[in-house]
């Protein structure tokens, strides 16, 4: 019973921190990509401690609450489709032995999800500010933005790995009692 209580408490605290980070992204418009990435990174201890099923449940709860509480749709969709979901599926992807296949899966994931996010935000639930912003972009500029985001995503991927190592060796014993 105590182990289940610890699991619920950890997920509740991390879920609240994730929502707080998403709300911080709304308060600071320049943090549209940073805050969802940090919020998703906060899910890593849950993925590590309780595996993907529990982390996916927490991800869904944060996603639903984010849709209801955070006014910035771009920020929330970046968490839902790009960073949050990736954090949950990162460990299974990292178990792929072939480095080229692992890299290809990550590259395909990020590009497909970016297309999904911006298709939703531009065509299905159009956000006027975003539609006007993208109207002024050339296709070459959009390609450059995609390339820059790919590079940033892979830096994020490495950063999440390092944060997980720090969590395991520095902070885990403080939060998780066996």
Image (cartoon, rainbow, N blue to C red):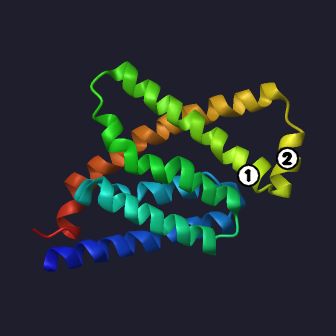
Residue 121: numbered disc = 1
Q: Which sits in the foreground, 138 or 155?
A: 138
* Image height of 102 relative to 52, above or below: above
Residue occupying the far front of the picture = 124
Identify the residue at horizontal 45%, vertical 46% (top origin). 86
Q: Kindly state the secondary structure of the residue where label 2 is placed.
A: helix
Quickly name the residue at label 2.
133
Say whether marks 1 and 2 touch (CB < 8 Å).
no
How packed mark 1 is, by other alpha carbons closer than 10 Å (few <14, some 14-19, many 20 or more), is: some
Give coordinates of residue 94: x percent, y percent: 32, 35
Report the quarter where the N terminus lies. Answer: bottom left
Identify the residue at horizontal 68%, vertical 64% (top origin). 28
How packed mark 2 is, by other alpha carbons closer than 10 Å (few <14, some 14-19, many 20 or more), is: few
* Image height of 103 relative to 5, above or below: above
Give coordinates of residue 177: x percent, y percent: 14, 70
Q: CA distance from mark 1 to mark 2?
A: 12 Å
Position of 173 with respect to 63 (left or right) is: left
Displayed quadrant of residue 98: top left
Residue 130: numbered disc = none
Q: Which sits in the foreground, 98 or 162?
A: 98
Identify the residue at horizontal 24%, vertical 60% (top origin). 50
Give coordinates of residue 23: x percent, y percent: 60, 70
Q: Kindly state the secondary structure of the residue where label 1 is placed.
A: helix
Q: Which sits in the foreground, 44 or 3?
A: 3
Report the quarter where the C terminus lies. Answer: bottom left
Give coordinates of residue 139: x percent, y percent: 81, 28
- Badge nearest the viewer, 1 or 2: 1
Identify the residue at horizontal 39%, vertical 19% (top origin). 100
Residue occupying the far left of the picture = 178
Displayed quadrant of residue 69: bottom right
* Image height of 86 relative to 35, above or below: above
Earlier in the chain: of badge 1 and badge 2, it is 1
């Amino acid at each position: 019973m105590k182990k289940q209580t610890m699991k619920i408490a950890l997920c509740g605290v991390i879920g609240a921190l994730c929502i707080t980070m998403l709300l911080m992204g709304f308060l600071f418009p320049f943090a549209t990509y940073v805050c969802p990435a940090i919020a998703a990174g906060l899910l890593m201890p849950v993925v590590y401690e309780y595996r993907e099923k529990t982390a996916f449940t927490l991800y869904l709860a944060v996603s639903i609450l984010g849709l209801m509480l955070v006014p910035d749709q771009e920020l929330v969709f970046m968490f839902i489709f790009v960073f949050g979901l990736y954090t949950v599926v990162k460990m299974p992807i990292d178990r792929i032995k072939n480095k080229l296949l692992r890299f290809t899966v990550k590259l395909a994931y990020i590009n497909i999800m970016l297309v999904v996010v911006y298709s939703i935000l531009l065509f299905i639930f159009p956000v006027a500010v975003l539609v006007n912003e993208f109207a002024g972009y050339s296709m070459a500029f959009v390609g450059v933005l995609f390339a820059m985001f790919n590079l940033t995503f892979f830096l994020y991927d490495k950063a999440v790995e390092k944060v997980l190592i720090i969590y395991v060796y520095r902070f885990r014993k403080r939060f998780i009692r066996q």
